[in-house]
């Protein structure tokens, strides 16, 4: 469910990550994706999308600094021991990487406040290439799940396969019912045939209920 107004829809990678996060960790929750861009998504206790934000990833920020500012070196993305660096590399790492972590902490706190739930009930799940680096330096991220998008794709595939199975079984059942409806019985009268369908597979049962 999409809990915000407007015609725009969430990007497929974010939607897949959100679906997997709800399935694996429950809701309400905040999903962070540390990719080329950094995204923040808020999901309600009912699983509705409440909104989010997008900011430049730390790698883009460092590369832009290297390309646009004279005499500054390109640096490795690591967290220095101190904010007060004594070299250009150390100072860039402190400003870019530690400043980036600080901005993420602000976004998490602000998102929690706007969601309207008690803070302790909101899980914060992070995925993406830099998720572990950020999570190791802030107490505000509860879970790092590098497989979130892959698990979301697998989950969607399973649901779609279950829906297709239910659809075709229902179509076969209705087709057999139509054929047997006019088949003559031993007494020479038309035979009304009722077909029952039950599924022991929980996923398929849920899919059938959704299609009803």
Image (tube, rainbow, N blue to C red):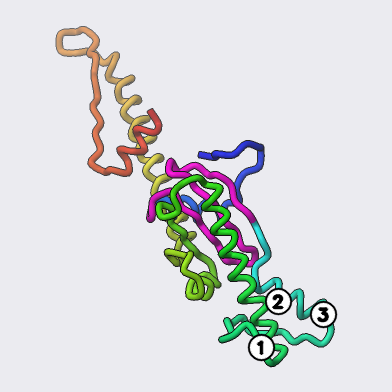
In magenta segment, residue 132: no
The image shows residue 147 at horizontal and vertical percentages of: 45, 65
In magenta segment, residue 41: yes
The structure residue drawn at horizontal position 82% and vertical position 80%, both measured from the top left corner, is 69
Q: Is residue 87 above or below residue 128?
A: below
For marks 2 and 3 on the same chain, the one whose residue lies earlier in the sequence: 2
Residue span colored magenta: 24-53
The structure residue drawn at horizontal position 53% and vertical position 60%, both measured from the top left corner, is 32
The image shows residue 184 at horizontal and vertical percentages of: 23, 13
Is the Cβ of the residue at disc 2 closer than 8 Å to that at disc 1?
no
Badge 3 density bin: few <14, some 14–19, many ≥20, Cα 10 Å: few
The image shows residue 151 at horizontal and vertical percentages of: 43, 59
For marks 3 and 1 on the same chain, the one whose residue lies earlier in the sequence: 3
Element marked by disc 3: loop
Q: Which residue is mark 3?
A: 69
Element marked by disc 1: loop
Magenta stretch, main secondary structure class: strand
Q: Which residue is mark 1?
A: 85
Element marked by disc 2: helix
Q: Is residue 21 above or below residue 181?
A: below
State the separation of the CA atoms marked 2 and 3. Answer: 10 Å
């Amino acid at each position: 469910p999409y809990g915000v107004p407007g015609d725009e829809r969430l990007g497929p990678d974010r939607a897949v990550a959100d679906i997997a996060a709800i399935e694996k960790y429950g809701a309400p929750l905040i999903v962070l994706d540390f990719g080329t861009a950094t995204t923040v998504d808020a999901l309600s206790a009912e699983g509705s999308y409440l909104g989010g934000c997008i900011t430049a990833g730390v790698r883009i920020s460092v590369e832009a600094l290297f390309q646009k500012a004279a005499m500054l070196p390109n640096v490795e993305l690591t967290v220095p021991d101190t904010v007060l660096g004594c070299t250009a590399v150390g100072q860039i790492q402190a400003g870019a990487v530690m400043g980036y972590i600080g901005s993420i902490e602000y976004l998490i706190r602000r998102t929690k406040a706007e969601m309207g739930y008690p803070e302790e009930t909101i899980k914060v799940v992070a995925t993406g290439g830099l998720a572990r680096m950020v999570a190791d330096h802030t107490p505000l991220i509860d879970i790092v799940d590098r497989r979130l998008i892959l698990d979301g794709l697998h989950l969607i595939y399973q649901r779609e396969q279950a829906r297709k199975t239910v659809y075709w079984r229902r179509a076969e059942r209705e087709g057999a019912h139509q054929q047997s409806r006019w088949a003559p019985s031993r007494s020479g009268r038309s035979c009304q045939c009722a077909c029952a369908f039950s599924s022991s597979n929980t996923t398929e049962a849920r899919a059938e209920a959704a299609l009803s």
